[in-house]
Image (cartoon, grey):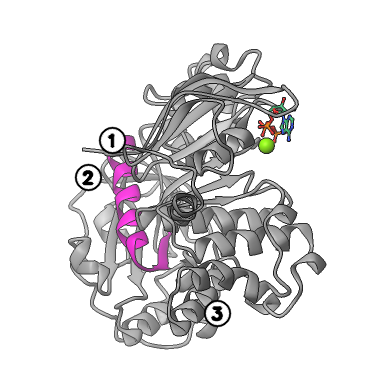
Amino acid sequence: MATTLLETKGLRYVYPDGTPAIRGVDLRIEDGERIAFVGPNGSGKSTLFLLLNGTLRPTAGEVLFRGRPLQYDPRSLRETRRRVGIVFQNSDDQLFAPTVRQDVAFGPVNLGLPMEEVEERVEMALEGVGISGLKGRPPHHLSGGQKKRAAIAGVMAMEPEVMILDEPLSNLDPAGSEEVMELLEELSQRGTTIIISTHDVDLAYRWSDRVCLLADGMVMDEGRPEDIFGDPRHLSGSGLRQPLILEVYDEISKRDLAAFGKRPRTVSELVGHLSPPNLRWMKVPPETEVGERIHPEGIDSVGPGRDKSEEVLVIHLQGGRAVVETLDKSVRIGRVIVYDTDGGDPQALSSLLADERIDLVGVMGTKSRAFAEKNQIVSDIGSNVIDRTILRALCGEAVLVITNGGMVEHAKRRIEEYCRQSGMKIEVSVVGRGADRAGSTPVPAPANAGKRR
Ligand SMILES: Nc1ncnc2c1ncn2[C@@H]1O[C@H](COP(=O)(O)OP(=O)(O)OP(=O)(O)O)[C@@H](O)[C@H]1O
Ligand SMILES: [Mg+2]
């Protein structure tokens, strides 16, 4: 059962100039949750966050951390801030040391950690946010996005139980935003509770377990993202728009083009709704022709363990792949191999990379990205790796996903869940140490270890 990490009871806050910013908020945030606060400018998101880690003291009501009311003496506050990390909306409020390295090290040094561990945490955090190259620079000379990354690194290095990030993506370029989201995903996989505020409804919708809609210092609505964003009535008057995926989904449902099911959260789910029940993309041998009837078990050359399936009719050909008509939804279409860089055999990886049956490679997670860079492995999928992997597998391709830690199991689970919900069949296997945890048999390395990239 989930345990409550943070709770507010009758929380109110009035700024010294008399502005009421939080006007009665009762909230519970569970351990391990990913929660996004959305709401118009001035609705109280930043104020609420500052109350959650004790930076502001409530005018009335209280904040509880793991069931105990926050105390506001300096010692208790230090302890709270160690466990409840906050990245401010404005990075200039956060960064103060002469160099980025010293700034990120400040927290861990204050925790009294041994120097080696401080070094290790600083390196990990800077690498995580992709600014290892800037550690000698003064923070006030960085660009807005670089400052944001430095501020996030500083909080990460404290390894708090919950990370609160006020507008973590403001100032970040699209690639930077994806990197930070991926980082938050990783921290979440490791069990850190993550709270963000954002004006990006597409992101809040895709990423969060729960969305909390603030307006005028009060919680207007909260719930699963598909419920909050799925019903335009929830959004009216909130200054928010519907996520793009839902807008498209609503339009196609109105036209009776979407299969009945839950609202899609990702592009692959949206595509799952659209897919006509009897059409599939799959790989076919070069000599295949339109109008031919073939057996899927005979045509898919990727890997062992083929299905016994009925005949399918080839109705369209394109670059070694075909659209086939089938009556059986469970015909396997593509294949995903997840390689765990934490415990995988490098030999197996190089065989996989050399295997011509692998169509593309996706690298996911900061550690694995560093690993890939070191080993000159090029990722064909820049961001949003799991979703894009599913989309490619749906087109009959074989994707190698290189990742590590909790992300191995997470990737496997997401793809399997997708298959269960959509009725599609994508084969997923895990290679490396994660193979035992994920309960799958390692794939034997193919013999033709040539050079792919
Ligand atoms: N230092 C302050 N002194 C007085 N009033 C303040 C102060 N900071 C914020 N406020 C007021 O408190 C209310 C809530 O502001 P807050 O910054 O929490 O909103 P927000 O939801 O974070 O907005 P944004 O989306 O613009 O970041 C607003 O009415 C704002 O004007
Ligand atoms: Mg704010």
- Pointer 1: what residue? 327
Q: Is residue 217 left or right of residue 62?
A: right
Question: How far apart are the two marked residues, 3 and 2, measured between alpha carbons?
Answer: 43 Å
Which mark is first along the chain, 1 or 2?
A: 2
Amino acid at dot 3:
Glu
- Of 153 and 227, the residue lying toward us: 153
Highlighted range, magenta: 397-422
Label 3 Cα crowd, 10 Å radius (few <14 / some 14-19 / many 20+): few
Residue 68, quarter of picture: top left
Of the two numbered discs 1 and 3 in the rendering, the one whose residue sits closer to the viewer: 3
- Pointer 2: what residue? 310
The magenta stretch spans residue 412: yes
Instruction: Name the element at disc 3.
Output: helix
Amino acid at dot 2:
Glu
Instruction: Name the element at disc 1.
Output: loop
Which mark is first along the chain, 3 or 1?
A: 1
